[in-house]
Image (tube, rainbow, N blue to C red):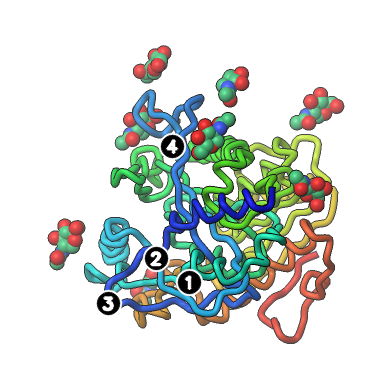
Amino acid sequence: MLFSNCLLTWTFLTICSASPTAPNQIKLPRPAGKYEVGLSITELVDHNRTQPFAPNGTLVKLMISVFYPVTHQHHSISGAYMTPDAALIEDNTLSKQGLAAPNGTFGKLALQLASDQTIQSRKDKSSCEHPAEYPLVIFMPGEGTTRLFYSQIVASVASKGYIVVAIDAPYDVDVVQYTDGSFAYINQTLWANDNPELADVALLAIQTRMADVSFVLDSLSNTTLAHSLIPNLPAYGLNTTHTAMFGHSLGGATAYSILDTEDRILGGLTMDGDLNGPPLLNGSSKPFMFIGSAGHTRENANDDPGSTWLSGWPKLLGWKKYLMVANTMHYDFSDYPIVFETLGITPANGTAFYLGDIKGKRQLEIVTSYVGAFLDFVLLGKESRLLDGPVKDFSEVTFEN
Ligand SMILES: *[C@@H]1O[C@H](CO)[C@@H](O)[C@H](O)[C@H]1NC(C)=O
Ligand SMILES: *[C@@H]1O[C@H](CO)[C@@H](O)[C@H](O)[C@H]1NC(C)=O
Ligand SMILES: *[C@@H]1O[C@H](CO)[C@@H](O)[C@H](O)[C@H]1NC(C)=O
Ligand SMILES: *[C@@H]1O[C@H](CO)[C@@H](O)[C@H](O)[C@H]1NC(C)=O
Ligand SMILES: *[C@@H]1O[C@H](CO)[C@@H](O)[C@H](O)[C@H]1NC(C)=O
Ligand SMILES: *[C@@H]1O[C@H](CO)[C@@H](O)[C@H](O)[C@H]1NC(C)=O
Ligand SMILES: *[C@@H]1O[C@H](CO)[C@@H](O)[C@H](O)[C@H]1NC(C)=O
Ligand SMILES: *[C@@H]1O[C@H](CO)[C@@H](O)[C@H](O)[C@H]1NC(C)=O
């Protein structure tokens, strides 16, 4: 068995999807956790469901990025932050919002990933005898923003010892590019700010995302698929029955509502999200945490005057925490701060991008430290002083009772 597991690992190693970037690339920081990080990207089609925001009959087709910890690596390589097409689209989209991002800007950006695994595992026979068991975690982006604009956060969480699967939400994020090169763009009619049905659209989007998460967990319970995506897994593949979810904004709302419907998700965390999905009718005793922007109290949700938190908070019957980070705004809980800082570009007007004054590296450290502490608590039963209350070394973080 052990031997065949090694063979399997060997066979699939070459699919690791780190692709070379342009020679004038600019590297994001190396994920700061204990491990280096590998990345596989794949497409999953649910033949049993259609997309509600796409032309009638369009099957649910998801892109996922799987970031996983890698042991025994000695150096890192660069992997393109975005596909060249997606990068150009984002250059244009963000330029229109007032960022100095001429064509080629995001195409230069690279993640620092683990070096070629084939060579490493050849040297390291022991890794075959002790396949790595890391808990599985699901991530979802905010509405309107590709999962790719969260890759540095997700990779950094993975480097703490989690296999993190970032699931995109076609037709509700700006753009998703599939493996055949085709695109799914956001349904602008439905998501227009002046659409009087916007609340219903958001509700349906969250319900769709909840079903997407369940479908991805079903798919990843297929050991052949799991082994093809991640080298050196134990024979049983991934532990899909004991997972947790975090997300930004609408992705965080999904992490809340899904507590009710998905037994495989043991706890949830939202980064600056409101609770505009299906309510937890009878309450949930699973752990849940909010970490959000300065001033986004439960009473005063910036984007939702009749705060959903006032009705949603009492439905959380178990462990729960509400944290806010000083000098931040909504998009400080994406990669924007670290990406803009790394590229050396500053939006002329940060508030137009919903960015506060916090530095990119610092915000990345705060977000990944607190998300990591939460996952350690939910999935490994580890206590952390970060979750007990304010601490000196993260003085930006305050707690609301
Ligand atoms: C497809 O959906 C139907 C009804 O929603 C359900 O009964 C069935 O189990 C699903 N099939 C698969 C393979 O998920
Ligand atoms: C937007 O969603 C509507 C409703 O499902 C659908 O009929 C339409 O084709 C979608 N438009 C685009 C451009 O996907
Ligand atoms: C969408 O397709 C289904 C069957 O595929 C059909 O029953 C339904 O009427 C169609 N809806 C629209 C709005 O065309
Ligand atoms: C930038 O890229 C877009 C999309 O590929 C293209 O339409 C546009 O002409 C390009 N602009 C410049 C200045 O090259
Ligand atoms: C499991 O995944 C493999 C590889 O993607 C696929 O070929 C196989 O059909 C899947 N098995 C099931 C039962 O879905
Ligand atoms: C998944 O994790 C749980 C909790 O640690 C454990 O009880 C269960 O046996 C694990 N499943 C597998 C297949 O290892
Ligand atoms: C809530 O509780 C009621 C009464 O016990 C039950 O009928 C219903 O199915 C529950 N709903 C959920 C979502 O658990
Ligand atoms: C920055 O953008 C915000 C939101 O778009 C706007 O309210 C504010 O007036 C702008 N400030 C400047 C200095 O342009």
| Cα–Cα span, label 3 and label 4 | 33 Å
Q: Residue at x 39, y 71 (%)?
A: 110
Sequence-wise, which precedes: disc 1 or disc 4?
Answer: 4
Sequence-wise, which precedes: disc 2 or disc 1?
Answer: 2
Per the image, the residue denoted by label 4 is 61
Say which of marks 2 and 1 sits in front: 1
Given residues 203 and 30, the one toward you in this image is 30
Circle 1 sits in a helix, a strand or a loop, which is it?
loop
Circle 3 sits in a helix, a strand or a loop, which is it?
loop
Q: Amino acid at mark 2?
A: Tyr
Per the image, the residue denoted by label 2 is 81
Report x, y in % for residue 278.
Answer: 65, 37
Q: Amino acid at mark 3?
A: Pro
Q: Residue at x 26, y 61 (%)?
A: 88
Mark 3 crowdedness (10 Å alpha carbons): few <14, some 14-19, many ≥20: few
Per the image, the residue denoted by label 1 is 115
Mark 4 crowdedness (10 Å alpha carbons): few <14, some 14-19, many ≥20: many
Sequence-wise, which precedes: disc 3 or disc 4?
Answer: 3
Per the image, the residue denoted by label 3 is 23
Circle 4 sits in a helix, a strand or a loop, which is it?
strand
Sequence-wise, which precedes: disc 4 or disc 2?
Answer: 4
Given residues 194 and 101, the one toward you in this image is 101
| Cα–Cα span, label 1 and label 4 | 30 Å
| Cα–Cα span, label 4 and label 2 | 21 Å
Task: Using the image, determine if residue 322 lies above or below residue 398.
Answer: above
Q: Amino acid at mark 1?
A: Ser
Residue 383 lies in quadrant:
bottom right
Circle 2 sits in a helix, a strand or a loop, which is it?
loop
Sequence-wise, which precedes: disc 3 or disc 2?
Answer: 3
Q: Residue at x 42, y 80 (%)?
A: 341
Say which of marks 1 and 4 sits in front: 1
